[in-house]
């Protein structure tokens, strides 16, 4: 009886300072499982859409990914940080525009934390759950389609991983990539389980679209939850082409 009590005490102390202690299972650990997926699918090119300051690219390098990274970030402040993050990595290219369904220019809402910046209006539920996500400004950005540049940035035969983190704008990015999808091995995108941005697609809509395009869901990870209720609001879904 002493050992379980001691374990619970240590776990309680760790959680009080923001850490956790639990049994390690390599097959279920999010980072190690994702690392294995990249290796299993022989990913050699990652398109990082909605790169912000380069957190996703940094994490790729941290888990040992050595292939190409091409990051897209339209926001001026975030792009400045992204430039610094990728500066010493010759395999990491950065592009200062967003992706969507059609080329043009559009107003871009800047959030306080910059990570929640979006082309869409934010709904109250998002701000209630993450107060530092509120909009504090706006700027005009350039938008292109992935189809218009895919042949320039991706070579035939590459195993491409498309990550889309565009705060509700995922469907528009996919609409501008329909001709490119047959050459995209694996996709990762945010799926909102409740409405968080005005006009954003539901998780069911995105799942159905990708299934019809020949992808199947191979991994899910929590992203955002309501701090009061514990209700899960957003997840990351990874889809792999099976036909």
Image (spheres, helix red, strand yellow):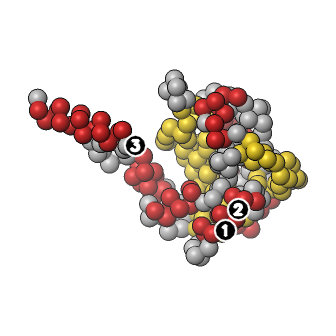
Residues at discs 1 and 2 in contact (Cβ within 8 Å): yes
Answer with the quarter of the image where residue 238 lies: top right
Residue denoted by label 3: 18
> Gap between marks 2 and 3, in whole Å?
30 Å
Residue denoted by label 1: 83
- Whether residue 179 is situated above or below residue 132 in the rendered picture: below
Residue 149 picture location, percent across and down: 77, 62
Quadrant position of the N terminus in the picture:
top left
Residues at discs 1 and 3 in contact (Cβ within 8 Å): no
Element marked by disc 2: helix
Residue denoted by label 2: 79
Element marked by disc 3: loop
> Gap between marks 1 and 3, in whole Å?
30 Å
**Residue farthest toward the left in the current orientation of the protein:** 1
- Whether residue 72 is situated above or below residue 228 in the rendered picture: below
Determine whether, in the image, residue 107 is placed left or right of residue 167. right
Asked if residue 207 shows in the view, the reply is no
* Residue found at x 13% / y 35%: 3
* Residue found at x 66% / y 33%: 127
Instruction: Mark 1 or mark 3: name the one nearer the start of the chain.
Output: 3
Quadrant position of the C terminus in the picture:
top right
* Residue found at x 54% / y 40%: 223
Element marked by disc 1: helix
């Amino acid at each position: 009886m002493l050992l379980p009590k001691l374990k619970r005490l240590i776990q309680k102390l760790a959680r009080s300072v923001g850490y956790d202690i639990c049994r390690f299972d390599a097959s279920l650990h999010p980072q190690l499982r994702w690392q294995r997926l990249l290796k299993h699918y022989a990913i050699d090119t990652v398109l990082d859409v909605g790169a912000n300051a380069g957190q996703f690219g940094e994490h790729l390098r941290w888990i040992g990914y050595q292939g190409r990274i091409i990051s897209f970030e339209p926001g001026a402040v975030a792009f400045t940080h992204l430039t610094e993050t990728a500066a010493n990595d010759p395999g990491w290219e950065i592009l200062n525009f967003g992706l969507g369904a059609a080329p043009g220019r559009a107003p871009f809402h800047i959030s306080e934390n910059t990570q929640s910046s979006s082309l869409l209006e934010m709904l109250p539920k998002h701000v209630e759950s993450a107060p530092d996500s509120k909009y504090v400004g706006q700027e005009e950005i350039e938008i292109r389609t992935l189809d218009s540049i895919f042949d320039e940035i991706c070579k035939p035969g590459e195993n491409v991983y498309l990550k889309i983190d565009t705060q509700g704008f995922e469907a528009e990015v996919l609409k501008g990539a329909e001709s490119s999808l047959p050459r995209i091995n694996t996709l990762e995108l945010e799926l909102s389980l409740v409405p968080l941005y005005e006009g954003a697609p539901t998780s069911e809509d995105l799942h159905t679209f990708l299934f019809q395009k020949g992808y199947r869901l191979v991994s899910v990870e929590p992203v955002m939850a309501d701090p009061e209720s514990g209700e899960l609001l957003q997840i990351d879904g990874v889809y792999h082409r099976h036909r």
